[in-house]
Amino acid sequence: MAKDSFVEQIADIDTDFPQWYTDVVVKTKLVDYGPVKGTMVIRPYGYAIWENIQREMDARFKAEGIENAYFPLLIPMSFMTKEAEHVEGFAPEVAVVTHAGGEKLAEPLCIRPTSETIIGSMYSKWIQSYRDLPVLMNQWANVMRWEKTTRPFLRTSEFLWQEGHAVHASEEESMALTLKMLHVYEEFARTCLAMPVLTGRKTEKEKFAGAVATFGMEAMMHDGKSLQAGTTHYLGQNFSKAFDIRFLDKDGALKYGYTMSFGVSTRLIGAIIMTHGDKRGLVMPPVVAPVQAVIVPIAAKKEGVLEACRALRDRLAAAGIRVTLDESENSPGWKFNEWEMKGVPVRIELGPRDLEAGKCLLARRDTLEKTECALDGAAQTIRELLAQISANMYERAKARMESRIVRANTLDELLAGVEGGNFVRAGWCGCRACEDKVKEFAQATARVLDGENTSDTCIVCGKKAEQTVVFARAY
Amino acid sequence: MAKDSFVEQIADIDTDFPQWYTDVVVKTKLVDYGPVKGTMVIRPYGYAIWENIQREMDARFKAEGIENAYFPLLIPMSFMTKEAEHVEGFAPEVAVVTHAGGEKLAEPLCIRPTSETIIGSMYSKWIQSYRDLPVLMNQWANVMRWEKTTRPFLRTSEFLWQEGHAVHASEEESMALTLKMLHVYEEFARTCLAMPVLTGRKTEKEKFAGAVATFGMEAMMHDGKSLQAGTTHYLGQNFSKAFDIRFLDKDGALKYGYTMSFGVSTRLIGAIIMTHGDKRGLVMPPVVAPVQAVIVPIAAKKEGVLEACRALRDRLAAAGIRVTLDESENSPGWKFNEWEMKGVPVRIELGPRDLEAGKCLLARRDTLEKTECALDGAAQTIRELLAQISANMYERAKARMESRIVRANTLDELLAGVEGGNFVRAGWCGCRACEDKVKEFAQATARVLDGENTSDTCIVCGKKAEQTVVFARAY
């Protein structure tokens, strides 16, 4: 194998973004295709991102008093049918177990597409009194939704996620947590993924099957399309009535609880890739990057170079930086390309002359700028640089998103807007027919409701508007 | 509800151990029964133990250079049949998906009972050259084995586990890691679970379906029965041949790799309960205890008591101790009983007189001893006490196990031994018929091979022995 054949070409990000995505996720070994159609294998470089997401997110949940638990994978089919909208939304997508232990099952079981039903059935058993409330639980789990068209991380039949499920005594508390968790997700996206998002309520058409109201965060991808990156659902008493989740209140009356749920998934990895990636490949946000800094020795065979690189690696690791030293036999140029494609935030070059001068060279992945850095205190310098990279990546993505949110007054303007890779703000009367018309005319959907709007007219029917909607094409 | 009705009676541990187990796991809210027969719901108090096990175990894996990944849940049925012993062992237990997305599948899929096959199929794709070896991966996942008789944590249709899968270029390296991981498990059990184990090779009859050799660690439960608490499998070239895992070696020849796998599961939680539990309920080993110390205020309404308790809690938490302050309205006596049943290693009592004297009272769960402790420096004292408790629990369990390993020269002695709640050492000729006879006569199985034995005779047939075997009744 010729060494230079390894850093393969990836498709051009601007002219063939879908192929760029496929090339990048496979060639950087984030993921591979599983043997069953629509499934993915998350390889170590991809799974490490998920572990970092889990660690950061889980700490936020625990700070809110949310405890982790684990509920069964298999749900009796009869549970799915207890909430009318829920079964309508999910039944077409479920995978069904009909045989087990060598026998046909009396009742078919479905692999959870989401767990409101089975968790509701347990909450019904556990909750007796107002003293038992609120119940705040989360699980990290795999779920399955059989999809016709799939893409790694974005839409696969099986994916990993967290699903939080809470019960409160009052509508106010339940809705408050629904909005609070949306805020937690937004803060997480900003802080850990350097990813700006729009947050807001979803339309009836776009809400979760069985919810009273769904709230989402939407992120703008490189091609201007939107990706739903997290949702929270206020479920009212829909599931508590379906699963008999009742509590004896202080006043002696038996009342139904109010439930809500919230989730993010391995889709976030796709969002990271498509928000920050560039023509060279991945650009990893430092907080969740599997490798935050890579050391590339220059003239590695010269005396003292490898030893100095190893000493630097050990010092950086001891300082809590996720660092790798590339000791492979590839050329420095090859290593530069490879680690750039893998999106490592900081590359550290260290050769004989640097060593003599007591310094090293730092190359930022986000701006490709290079700066010198004294070997003494390198950990502190690199830590600060990682924070700068994170802030810069966020600001750059935010400026980009904001510059690409346009206003439309006609369907033609809306179409031109989304075709140009923009999010489009427009007035909407609130009716389903007009929402469907936008989809049909511009292949765009209502991503979030952006506030009341009574001074405007509906972009479709021209009647008085009720809401401003952000429309976009979406993943 | 009368308050004193809450701390319910649990069955007597010595006269009805199975009922004691069921009472304890349900009443301490470790687990509940799921709606599908044989499934369990792991509640927050139980799941927190699993999170602690994961954290400790995962750090050990990473120290060995093992990376986490995630492979699909669903395995094509045709994969299972590629390794003859493997399919024979697992096919009767699998759950089968026949329909998905509203359609009948062309090929039925099974929910992974273990992942050698699907991981093997991916390794075949990823491994080309000796430079790609070794491959060292692990996944934290759910698996499913349809069982007739189930008990929470010990045997359930779905359980959580980790499964590590490695490929090496040589038999020596593969076998070395198989033994190394057994050692890692033993060290983990000792250090984190205060659980002594016997380790050793399994007989042909007891080995993993598809392995060349299986090694296990066996722990002695309160009733003297054995529980298999972790296994490592040397798979030789069985799976590399079935899945075509080949690499181009340095000498230019294309060779099959050597694979091995290793796993522990939520069964470990059952092992903890049944190793350390006593008539009062759980006794949690400090390293994995969800709550390491609970503060019970005495005369909580007296001025300054609650404030002092909260200040102490905050100081202990800041020192890294997992601490809870019980501010409920229950009486101190009620709280003592409840937290004892939940097995919290250290109870801290703090009342007005303690406060005046600048001290608190520490009650150990393992020995029930009480000692005074100055409030200044309490964190350090409690940290040391937790380490003492851990060491004491290990030594106590070890002494107990060692005192209950007996020697038998006849089948009658073996039967008497296992009926008396012992592990029984005996000579064995190595043939399956004699192993089966022990099972039939004494309902005991070969737990581990305990070394060569040529000076002895087989306990069944009286021929020259080849091995010493530890026989026991087992979970």
Image (cartoon, coloured by chain):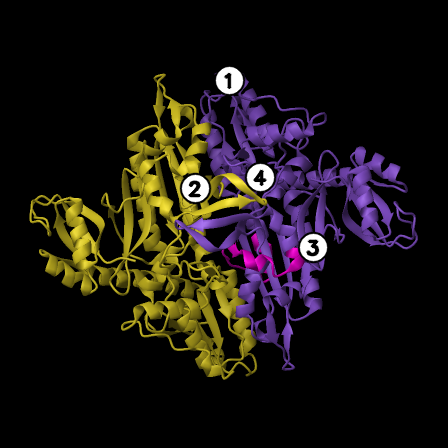
Chain colours: A purple, B yellow
**Which residue in the protein does label 3 denote?**
A183
**Which residue in the protein does label 1 denote?**
A3
The answer to the question of whether label 4 and label 2 lie on touching residues, with beta carbons closer than 8 A, is no
* Label 3 – label 1 distance at C-alpha: 47 Å
Task: Provide the chain ID for the residue under circle 1.
Answer: A
* Label 4 – label 2 distance at C-alpha: 20 Å
**Which residue in the protein does label 2 denote?**
B138
In the image, residue A46 lies in the stretch drawn in magenta: no
User: Residue A467 location, x and y as percent?
Assistant: 84, 53
Residue A333, relative to residue B141: is it above or below?
above
**Residues in magenta, as a range:** A58-86
Task: Provide the chain ID for the residue under circle 4.
Answer: A
Task: Provide the chain ID for the residue under circle 2.
Answer: B
Q: Nearer the viewer, mark 3 or mark 4?
A: 3
Residues packed near mark 3 inside 10 Å, few (<14), some (14 to 19) or many (20 plus): some
On the picture, is A277 further left or further right than B141?
A: right
Q: Which numbered circle lies on residue A289?
A: 4
Tag 2: residue type?
Asn
